[in-house]
Image (cartoon, rainbow, N blue to C red):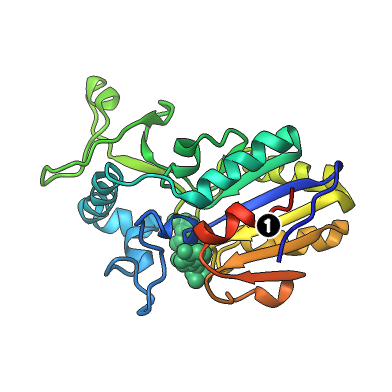
Amino acid sequence: MRISLTPTSRVLVLSGAGISAESGVPTFRDAGGLWEGHAVEVVASPEGFANDPLLVWKFYSSRRARMADVVPNAGHHALVALEAELGDRYLLATQNVDGLHVAAGSQRVVEMHGTLMRSRCTRCDRPAFADTTAYRDNVAPMCGRCRERGRDALLRPDIVWFGEALPIGVLDRIEAFITSAGRDLVFVAIGTSGLVYPAAGLVDATRKVGGQSWLVNLEPPANATSFDHVVLGPAGATLPTLFAP
Ligand code: OAD
């Protein structure tokens, strides 16, 4: 099955953990409902962080350390090629925090859940900063700027956790793209279980404006029946030939 685009088509891609699976990045929900052995609420919620910041930092530090060996796969590269063809008629919204779309060369990207490779202070208004450090100490990292001011404040990964709002402007940018595309919208969800909102609701927003929706996933996810077309298979093998010339 292939997606035929017209000269007025506007493509909104939503990617999830599945697109990075072939790069060796583990997805979030394994067979036991755990994320690398941890319940998601322990390592991906403000409550979990307040309860045990060191455990949470160990978890993200190990993910950071592993990213050093990870490279984008054919799925990421296929989206870069699609963007090169479509320009402003393309937008990529990703739930992934692994930075692989940007590493592959994608430019029109909205990182809905932040990124693993940035940290921010839990207290001061210092902007989030690039941080690839895999912290090894037995204490969670602290904000250097707050320390200069004589107070202690934890750093945290610049990631949106469960129960937290998306960064300002993220949903506006996606919604503006959907609204301006209208019936020309081609929404393509790739490698996502369809469980986490607001991303999971984009397929309904697409239907409302009269666009068409596609799903590329290894297996049918929770909201598979909401899509007009479903392509089952690994993203890296499927995406390079999905968009008809
Ligand atoms: P999930 O782990 O929930 O789902 C990944 C989906 O990808 C599953 O439906 C798999 O079947 C599918 N999949 C696995 N390998 C694939 C492959 N090679 N090609 C195509 N599909 C494949 O990940 P997400 O849906 O991204 O949030 O999870 C959504 C959010 O929940 C994440 O951003 C994260 C998480 O908890 C936060 O961290 C806030």
* Whole-percent x, y for residue 213 in the image: 75, 62
Classify 29 as above or below 237.
below
Which residue is at the far left?
Answer: 138
Figure check: 7 above or below 219: above
Instruction: Decide which of 206, 47 is in the foreground and name it.
Output: 206
Q: Which residue is mark 1?
A: 188
| The quadrant where residue 99 appears | top left
Relative placement, left or right, of 133 versus 115 is: left
Query: In this image, 95 relative to 63: left or right?
Result: right
Quadrant in the picture for the N terminus: bottom right
Depth order, front residue of 28/10: 10
Residue pictured at 59% horizontal, 52% vertical? 240
- Is disc 1 placed on a helix, strand or loop? strand
Q: Position of residue 124 (x, y in %)?
A: 38, 30
Asked whether, in this view, residue 192 is left or right of residue 128, the answer is right
Residue at 65%, 65% (x, y): give it: 215
Is residue 61 at least partly visible in the picture? Answer: yes
At 70% from the left and 53% from the top, the residue drawn is 243
